[in-house]
Image (cartoon, rainbow, N blue to C red):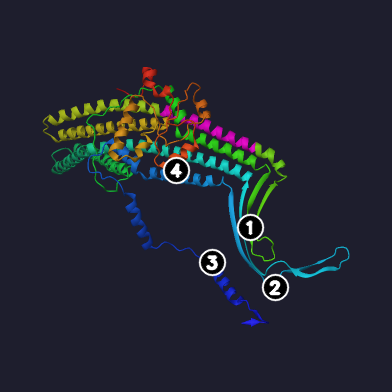
Amino acid sequence: MTICGKPRLPLRQLLAVVTTILVGGCSLVPHPMTDDERAAELQIDTAAMFAGQEPLNHPLTLHEALARALKYNLDARVKVMEEALASDDLDLSRYDLLPKAGYNGAYLTRNNVDGSSSRSVTTGVQTLEPSTSTDRDRLVADLTLSWNLLDFGVSYFNARQQANRILVVDEQRRRVTQNLFQDVRRAFWRAAGAQVLNARIKSAIHEAQGALTNSRQVEKEGLRPPVDALRYQKALLDLLRQLESVQQVLAISKTELASLINLPPGQNYSLAVPRSLAVQPLHVSMARMEETALMLNPDIREQSYLKRISVDEAHKAILKLLPSANLSWGPNYDSNSFLVNNTWTAGAVRIGGYLNSLILAPVTLRRTDNATLLVDTRREALSIATLAKLHIAYQQYLAASRDYSRSTELADVDQRLSQQITNRTASDVQGDLERISAEVSAVFSELRRYQAYAEAQAALGRIYATLGVDPVPSAAASYDVIELSREIRRGMLEWQRGQIAEPVADAGQGAAPSDVASTATANIATAKPETAKSETAKSETVKSEAAKTVSPSAVPSSVATATTAAPPAADQKIGVN
């Protein structure tokens, strides 16, 4: 349909489309997940949680438990994925350093002629008749390459910050791994005690229940004075309560271990418990452990990388106070038939800024100084806390070692006493009580021995976690469980000999910055970087570019040769023989 020879615009149709879109957008409401959707999601999650794991069809050793935790624990997997995500962010930030290439294209039209006339500014008389120099319909396009020097500087520091964030995430991954090993150590030995003592506890409960039944029968028949019978039953009930309480605690020990190594709930498995348990001394002096902790502890190193980020943030703030220079160049096209040249190339150099930057400069500089000082203070406070944790873990390990030594002696005495009482012929009910009490006492002593050993291992794990030494080289991440457990066993033997040599870090991870080394001690020698194989080739490339100073795997030679270079004094050895 036309009006006066011109096409009529479809305003009603256009209005209807716009109204439909607006109404549809305003009608969006939350839609709760249905049971079917959650069931499908649950099925996918359940399959993914335990997918790709090597089956466990043999007794589990401590080293294999540590290997399975390192390889399959979901918390550790989360940190690895966060590290990969940070690596992707660094890749994206690199592209911000490049000049911006933008393109535009448009089709322009109008319903009448774009005409104009001129009028003299002196006489006010029209000098030209109305004319036009623009087509009613035309195509325009341009491709512009622009580079803002200020944006380039800011993007450069953004990329440096992102590179350091990768290292921050890697330190967090190291911390999670070390804490995981500490938890697995303790859970394994608690579960080992439960497995070894489970049969004895059940036997003791069965005997106590039988003696209780007999005592009630004797009381009923009047064969013993009521007071003596009730005292005897009370003693048996106290023993039963203690046994059942211990049995309940031990029942969940293997479940806790299974959750740490990511075994499916309810899966039956057994532990390979050594016949003899020994707490080995660690021949490293406290002074060298302090140096190592201040140099390699992941919490302190994380604060050092955060300082780098804070310093770069200060550089960005200063850059933003400066004037900006923008360079642009690119080809253009216009289909306008009145133009002499429909294609041309244009370039420009523009400089601009804000006058109020002069006012903001003093405040900005003061804030950047305070932010850097805050990070330094946090790191120093964390260093003090790390030293305190190290000394506490040291004392706890000494106490747990002594407790284990005494618990072993007590368990041996109780076991021999129980055997002597069992071998002795008892002709009365009181003899049964003595025998059952001796057996329960022997069970409790053996349980305390395993608990003391578990606490000693947990304290040792806290020492290693505070020191920042890593369990295995990062190249072992691609190993299978058997190979990984072998590497862990080798590393633990080196720890016991005092060879605290190489903390694990992904390839290219930067060393503790010089401020950490100076805070730790002035006589720590700087080692050469030793690049470890990355978990993935991508993270290896990123981190090697992110930090090219000193690798955290480079431990001071004075620490690495603790055993041979400077044997500690006897009172500085950890553990007991």
Indicate the position of residue 311 as horizontal and vertical percent values: 58, 36
Mark 2 touching mark 3, by CB under 8 A?
no
Indicate the position of residue 89 as horizontal and vertical percent values: 50, 46
Amino acid type of the residue that numbered disc 2 sits on in the rendered structure: Asn
Q: Marks 1 and 4, how far apart in space? A: 44 Å
- Dot 2 falls on a residue whose secondary structure is loop
User: Dot 2: few (<14), some (14–19), or many (≥20) neighbours within 10 Å?
Assistant: few
Q: Name the residue beneath numbered marker 4.
A: 83
Of circles 2 and 3, which is in front?
2
Q: Is residue 348 magenta?
A: no
- Dot 3 falls on a residue whose secondary structure is helix
Task: Please report the residue visible at 41 percent of the width from the left and 61 percent of the height from the top.
Answer: 33
Q: Name the residue beneath numbered marker 1.
A: 332
Q: Name the residue beneath numbered marker 2.
A: 112
Q: Marks 2 and 4, how far apart in space? A: 60 Å
Q: Give the range drawn in magenta.
A: 366-392
Q: Marks 1 and 3, how far apart in space? A: 38 Å
Quarter of the rendering containing residue 337: bottom right
Q: Name the residue beneath numbered marker 3.
A: 25
User: Dot 3: few (<14), some (14–19), or many (≥20) neighbours within 10 Å?
Assistant: few
Which comes sooner in the sequence, label 2 or label 4?
Answer: 4
Describe residue 4's horizontal placement relative to residue 521 as left or right: right
User: Dot 4: few (<14), some (14–19), or many (≥20) neighbours within 10 Å?
Assistant: many
Of circles 2 and 4, which is in front?
2
Amino acid type of the residue that numbered disc 3 sits on in the rendered structure: Gly
Indicate the position of residue 361 as horizontal and vertical percent values: 69, 39
Which comes sooner in the sequence, label 1 or label 4?
Answer: 4
Describe residue 366's horizontal placement relative to residue 164 as left or right: right
Along the line of sight, the residue nearer the viewer: 95 or 496: 95
Which comes sooner in the sequence, label 1 or label 2?
Answer: 2
Mark 2 touching mark 4, by CB under 8 A?
no
Which comes sooner in the sequence, label 3 or label 4?
Answer: 3
